[in-house]
Image (cartoon, grey):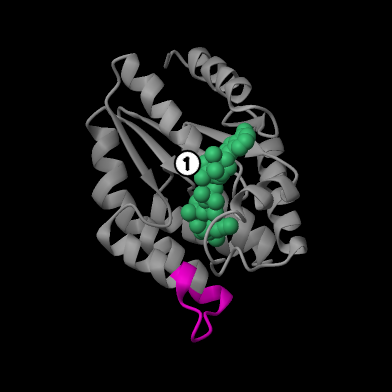
């Protein structure tokens, strides 16, 4: 059995996941929790190498199934090397994206059969799920608009508007199916208001 707390942040790109992951870490550390801040795909040396392929390998095609398997390969390493040891050491793991992103991007976006994802989830995670997921939600033009200010688009960022609409809808569907775990925040507001909502969610779980 594990002892720590596993928190994930989700949403389409540019909604503020990285910004609020840092905020959550700061709040938790102010309240005496030991934290590990990490991300997917990535979080380990192997996982970061896989991330590089997933995001930037554009010279040769990657099939949807290969993409799915690469994501779960990175996740398997991340769980064994970082997440499970941290939870066993009673730490709070804050992870920028996790398996909900797979349902949203590979399930919703790429339209891979949900049951295939469920099989891999059960195999790789053996029942481990986040205790709390914060889903930052904005209309896609807001998120994409914020992200577009940055450098060259990666493999996902080059997808169509319809792809991101499906991703967003799948995230909202996941939240409807697991309302206790997945807390939706309207991220189309000033940072301070979003952080007040985050504080309330953490306080309700006695984390701040
Ligand atoms: N992927 C997948 O397909 N399947 C999976 O299972 C997993 C991932 C785990 C990499 O993700 C890609 O991997 C991802 C899906 C795929 N691709 N996409 N798209 P990533 O997390 O590294 O990439 P990202 O979502 O593109 O990250 P991001 O663009 O950095 O977004 P963010 O972390 O949500 O946003 P941010 O960096 O905190 O904020 C972006 C900017 O907006 C920044 O300048 C902020 O200051 C600003 N911002 C944030 N919030 C606000 C508010 N409220 N008002 C004004 N400005 C704001």
Mark 1 CB lies closer than 8 A to ligand 1: yes
* Residue shown at the point (69%, 66%) measured from the top left: 111
Q: Quadrant of residue 63?
A: bottom right
Horizontal and vertical percent position of residue 130 = 46, 37
User: Is 176 drawn above or below residue 106 in the view shown?
Assistant: above
Q: Residues within 10 Å of mark 1 (few under 14, many from 20)?
A: some
Horizontal and vertical percent position of residue 56 = 46, 72
Callout count: 1
* Magenta-span inclusion, residue 61: yes
Q: Is residue 188 left or right of residue 18?
A: right
Q: Which residues are magenta?
A: 54-66
Q: Quadrant of residue 53?
A: bottom left
Q: Does residue 135 appear in this view?
A: no
Q: Is residue 64 left or right of residue 50?
A: right
* Residue shown at the point (71%, 42%) measured from the top left: 172
Q: Which of 190 and 122 lies nearest the eye of the viewer?
A: 190
Where the N terminus falls, by quadrant?
top left
* Residue shown at the point (55%, 70%) measured from the top left: 155
Q: Is residue 175 left or right of residue 67?
A: right
* Residue shown at the point (72%, 63%) measured from the top left: 163
- Judging by the rendered image, the residue that carries numbered circle 1 is 18
Horizontal and vertical percent position of residue 92 = 34, 29
Q: Which of 53 and 152 lies nearest the eye of the viewer?
A: 152
Extreme residue toward the bottom, this view: 60
Q: Is residue 123 left or right of residue 178?
A: left
User: Is 62 drawn above or below residue 177 in the view shown?
Assistant: below
Q: Does residue 196 appear in this view?
A: yes
* Magenta-span inclusion, residue 98: no
Where the C terminus falls, by quadrant?
top left
* Secondary structure under the numbered disc 1 in the rendered image: helix
């Amino acid at each position: 059995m594990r002892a720590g707390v596993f928190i994930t942040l989700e949403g389409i790109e540019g909604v503020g996941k990285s910004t609020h992951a840092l905020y959550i870490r700061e709040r938790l550390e102010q309240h005496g929790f030991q934290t590990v801040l990490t991300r997917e795909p990535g979080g380990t040396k192997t996982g970061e190498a896989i991330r590089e392929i997933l995001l930037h390998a554009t010279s040769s095609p990657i099939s949807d199934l290969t993409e799915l398997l690469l994501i779960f390969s990175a996740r398997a390493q991340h769980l064994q090397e970082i997440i499970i040891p941290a939870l066993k050491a009673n730490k709070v793991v804050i992870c920028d994206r996790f398996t909900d992103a797979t349902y949203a991007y590979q399930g919703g976006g790429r339209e891979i059969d949900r049951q295939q994802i469920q099989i891999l989830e059960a195999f790789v995670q053996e029942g481990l799920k986040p205790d709390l997921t914060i889903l930052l939600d904005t209309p896609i033009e807001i998120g994409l608009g914020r992200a577009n200010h940055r450098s060259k688009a990666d493999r996902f960022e080059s997808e169509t508007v319809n792809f991101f609409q499906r991703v967003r809808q799948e995230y909202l569907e996941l939240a409807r199916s697991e309302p206790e775990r997945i807390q939706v925040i309207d991220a189309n507001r000033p940072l301070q208001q979003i952080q007040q909502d985050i504080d309330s969610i953490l306080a309700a779980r006695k984390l701040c």
